[in-house]
Amino acid sequence: MDPKGLEGRTIAILVADNFHVLETFYPYFRLKEEGAGVFFVGAQAGAVYKDSGGEPVTASLSVEEALSVKFDLIHCPGGFAPLTMRANPAMLELARNHFERDGLFATICHGGSFLVSMGILRGKRATCYKTLKDDLVNAGAEYIDDAPVIDGNLITGRTPADLPMFMEAVVVTMKGGQQSKTDLAGTKAAVLVESRYQVHEAWYCYFRLKSKHVDTVFIGPDDEETVFSRYSRYPLTPDLTISSATSDLYDALVVTGDWASDKMRIEPPFLNFLRKHHRAGKIVASIAEGHSVLISANLLSGRNVASLPEMRPDVENAGATWVDPATAVDGNLVTAGSTLNLPKFLPELIRKLEMG
């Protein structure tokens, strides 16, 4: 793994209202992890766009400003934002100009509708969300029910479930075909979740571990079949309840933040599960407010911990030494401060898994 493999590359992610939160932010953090400069491009610079549930993204460049930038990659996420963007002549001009000079273009799910309006699909192999199949075929594409589909400078995917391998294809293509030598097949990890979970932290950890072929599951509460993120209300149905998972042992547990952690820290099954893994020498990883769960499980005493600055008193009162870096590794404990530290947090967690 080369965290600076795309350093110096410039990437645009197209945004508008009703963007898909995972298809927008997983690529953002994944490309940041590789060292790329990533810009959200919207109709207006500084405008705040929201997904269907209210999750925000701020455009760092207007489409008019972006027309003068030579990007190494343009990514069009799905959701219903592409229906707005395909009606914007400047957005289509930006995308066509980039594509016609052989710039790499990636899109997933309902982003296929944007490709149709770009008018570049004739003779191309591509995929999309299944409801758009007829539109792609009518535009001249050969529809492939698989992902990722790579045809020259076009990479397409079908649904959020394709994101781990879709983005690895993007990264490998941008690196000139350089494949990662690390495959963590045979290792197991679990991301602990509760209601009002942090959508970027939970899903980035899950998808990034999946991209390394880690057998990764979500473990959730006993009393809710589906939990929802706080802002976007994005649904997540855990693979296991915490009570059904108590006999299992994973190579790594991940605790993410937001209000979910406030609930997990008072639930004995979650605390006991963490203590069990800690005693067994397994990796325990935590980010942002997730540290509060580790505090209540009494796992931080004597450890070096990176946390949100506002949590420093809590971390130190729990017996830990607060450290300034965004991410800290102390034995089997991996910690990070905020959501923005995900691009550093996951490489450290993956390195620990590689060490066995």
Image (cartoon, helix red, strand yellow):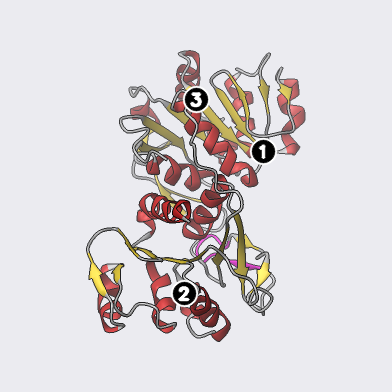
Q: Using the rendered image of the protein, determine whether residue 287 is visible from the camera's viewpoint.
A: no
Quarter of the image for the N terminus: give it: top left
Question: Which amino acid does the dot numbered 3 rest on?
Answer: Gly
Q: Tag 1's secondary structure? A: loop
Question: Which amino acid does the dot numbered 2 rest on?
Answer: His
Q: Residue at x 44, y 77 (%)?
A: 293
131 sits to left or right of 345: right
Is 231 in the magenta? yes
- What is the C-alpha distance between the residues marked 2 and 3? 38 Å
Magenta segment = 226-233
Q: Residue 59 appears in which quarter of the rendering? A: top left
Packing grade of label 1 (10 A; few <14, some 14-19, many >=20) is many
**Disc 2 + disc 1, Cβ < 8 Å:** no
Residue receiving disc 1:
158
In this rendered view, identify the residue nearer to me: 172 or 233.
172
Q: Tag 2's secondary structure? A: helix
Residue receiving disc 3:
177
In this rendered view, identify the residue nearer to me: 116 or 348.
348
Q: Residue 216 got which mark?
A: none
Q: Residue at x 66, y 75 (%)?
A: 224
Residue receiving disc 2:
278
Q: Using the rendered image of the protein, determine whether residue 249 is visible from the camera's viewpoint.
A: yes
